[in-house]
Image (cartoon, coloured by chain):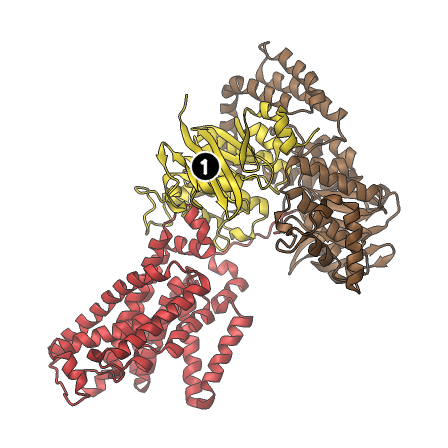
Chain colours: A red, B yellow, C brown
Amino acid sequence: MTNEKILYLGLGIFGIVGPILFPDYTLQIAMLWIMVLMASTWDITGGQMGYNSLGNITFFGVGMYVCAAIQVSMFYDLAEYTASYGAIKPVFTESEYFIGLILGIVAAGVVCVGLSLLLGLAVFGLRGPYFAIGTLGVAVAMREIVTTMDTVGGGAGISMPFLPLPIEYRSLFFYVLCFLLAVAAHFTIRWMFSTQFGLAANAIRDDEDKAEAMGIPTLRYKQFGWAVAAFYMGCIGAVFGNMSGYIEPQNIAFPLPTFGIFMVAMALLGGKGTLWGPVIGAIAFHIVKETTWTYLLDWQYIVLGLVLIVNIVYFQQGIMGWLKSMYPEKFGIVVDKSTNVSKGDA
Amino acid sequence: MSENIIEVNNVSKAFGGVKANVDISMVVERGSITGIIGPNGCGKSTLFNSIVGYHPIDSGSILFEGNEISHLVVGDIARLGMLRTFQQTRIYGEMDCVDNMQISVSHRPGSQATMFASRRGEIRERAEQLLEFVGLYSKRNLISGDLSFGQQKLLEFAMALMNEPKVLLLDEPTAGINPTLINGLIDRLRRANEELGITLCVIEHNMRVIMNLASDIYCLSNGKMLASGKPEDLQNDPRVIDAYLGGH
Amino acid sequence: MAKEPVKKTAAKAASTKKAPAKKPASLKKAVAKKAVAKEPVKKTAAKAASTKKAPAKKPASLKKAVVKKALAKAVKKTKKNVSGYGGGSVDVVMSVDQVAREAASIAANAPTVKELQKLANNENYLTINNLRAGYGKMEILHEFSLSIGRGQSLCLIGPNGAGKSTVLHSIFGFTNIFSGSIIVDGQDVTALTPSQKLSEAGIAYILQDKSVFPQMTVEENLLMGGFLKDRPAEAKAAAEMVFDKYSRLADRRDKPAGVLSGGERRLLEISRALVMQPQVLLVDEPSIGLEPRFIDMVFEILGDLQKKDGKTIIMVEQNAKKGLSFADIGYVLVSGETAIADTGTALLDNPDVGRLFLGG
């Protein structure tokens, strides 16, 4: 347990002090926290429950759009605004902006929860690879639907309101939002999995039919898990939209080939089905990504792809899984050393 | 005279062209231990699956405590208090034994097991007590998938007890278990029946087990009910000997 | 750690204290049940014994002892003829740990290699020498030795997880062998792959339950048994020989294997292994999942293969009584080591073996 306290202390200090020590990298560290949140929330249904979703990015994008729509439409006509292609340059007062932002983030979270419940009715009847493809399909569909909606700018997107703070505080402001959301998500997940919920989720992963036969209301647990993931994805999407300054469906709101896959890759790399696995995986992945971007730009995606392949073929248990097999006692896992019992039938 | 906790009335089920169950009727008395025997392919497992809601039936009715259940699904029937164990022992292989037990607590409306109940409280204590009952206390912190086959069977049984069912349907509980452990398992089944009041319904091939365990036995053959009665009667019934036991 | 034994004994004391109070009513029932569970020939004797005793108001423990004696007598007379899963009571209850402890003390006098060879009539057709083997890094068998003569049958019994299947797996090449050797007819086969074992060394492995290809016909299953033959025509010829031998299979040659009854499936599994004309048969739990009438049938087939065709048979059997009544030699395995080895009949008569491994 002391190891964990050290981790919390280290990450906490880094989180608070990082942007002060490395102001040029503030947004990059903010990205790190976004990745941590994405990987951790993916793992709720993915690693812990065995429902590998390829469509969590849906909530990222929907949250982004809901927030943007609210921020703009509270004080301007949204359709006019988007139709003008930037000709209307709104100026928000501080209170207008912040009220819009806060309401927008909350609404983003809530709408995504509702969306997850609705979609869940359709996709939670699917299992394994079918669930993955089903959720992927949902993400693609959502992206395309948004592209056709002229009210929110269609393919051209929405130009986000400008943050009415001195420019030197802009990065820090968004950094704080990202960090707080990542911390909130982490501790929500930590609490959830310390209760019976965690056991039910793992039971569903290990043998869902058995769980059903024992009377566990599996749908309820699946819905709740995905709703929590949707909430935080929606919130972070809202923040990210504001960070970017400009949102559009293909590359910012619903970036399926990048973030959509990254969140899975990070959880796998760190060790899915654990509390710290996605966190460590996100950090490792982000470091590799940023380093290759700086030094090996042409090779960046090749390197990331290789990391993924090596992970899946040779290293399926991920970093946490590997640590657990090397030092089981440190994780409270009990290994029976007394008898070498043959696991076969006789 | 105790009432019938399960009543199967003229149940038929066919899969494609194969008539798995034809007009089967049987009853299970509350608090009893009932056995179901018969050759492989006679429809025993299909009957079990029909009772627990694994699939709908074609015709007939199934009553549990007087209420019709043939239209309900597995989860609903489990929450009413009727559980089944599997022939191929099924447990949650990545979790340790105590966790397997804890999550097996009853999920009936009104039970303690709310979605976010603590993992450290009374539920855990009961789990450990039941592990003691089946003799797995010393293995309680091991990953259940690492246990031997016989130990996994005991764990599955303990998990069923944790759920406090009214009826437990056991599908060949002693298959692949060595004879001495069989005795231990039967002893615990009997105690679960006598001390905890759980009604048992057991499919078995091992006659030594069934004869020493069940008070009433039903023998199926070719999808139909062949004979029923007390163990001694069935063992000497020429139809049963012919279809199932084989001559001595 | 010290808490556990105290808990256990307290619980046990509580339960045994309860039991006698309930006994009188249920004991009569149990006595009657036990009497009925015997072979029909012995029924009258046992029934006479129990009905004589029942009306007299003897104390519970004495009643039980008297009935047990009658049972023991009955068992002794029919020791070689165990049908199906065997009869008997289920009263001997011991925990797995208890069995392990007592077995460990018996294993202190484990049989020497010389004694094992004597059981095999000093023929040593197939020997395993000081084998250490297991799966991955885990060692299941510790210095395991075995000796069997040509045309003999040997049955491995013991608690779950003792390593019985591991012995068969090791002979056939499915395990990691850390040290030791396996010699068949003078040839060292330890390092051969399973395919080589089947095609060159004449060793066939019959898996535990449900190993037919259900969508393929009976004939196709047999042809698959001859997959390693040089030419398909040879496999077809061998399959025809099997059909000649077992008309039951011939009648169903075009049916998908999945529709066969349990006994027929087992027959198919066994005869499929015969296609390669092996000398040694490794049979993993012949009676598992079978109904009583087919158990006897399967053992008849195996007996036929041993006595008429001279096959050497090594089997693992949880239905220990049946296995020991069939086999010439019996080994009792506990925790990867042989605790006791003797002839099948001697082990059946051994009261310790009965108590610890045969369920009474």
Mark 1 crowdedness (10 Å alpha carbons): few <14, some 14-19, many ≥20: many
Q: Would you say C34 lies left or right of A258 here?
A: right
* Mark 1 belongs to chain: B
Q: Position of residue A70 (x, y in %)?
A: 17, 74
**The image quarter in which residue B244 lies:** top right
Seen in the picture, residue C38 relative to B159 is either above or below; the reply is above
Counting from the top left corner in percent of width and height, residue B14 is at: 49, 44
Task: Determine the residue positioned at 39% across, 72% down.
Answer: A263
Which residue occupies the foreground of this view, A62 or C237? Answer: C237
* Residue at far top of view: C56
Which residue, given by chain and number where applicable, does mark 1 sit on? B11
User: In this view of the protein, which residue sits in the foreground, B166 or B238?
Assistant: B238
User: At which x and y percent is residue C63?
Assistant: 61, 16
Residue B66 image point, x, y percent: 36, 31
Secondary element type, mark 1: strand
Q: Is residue C287 above or below residue A286?
A: above
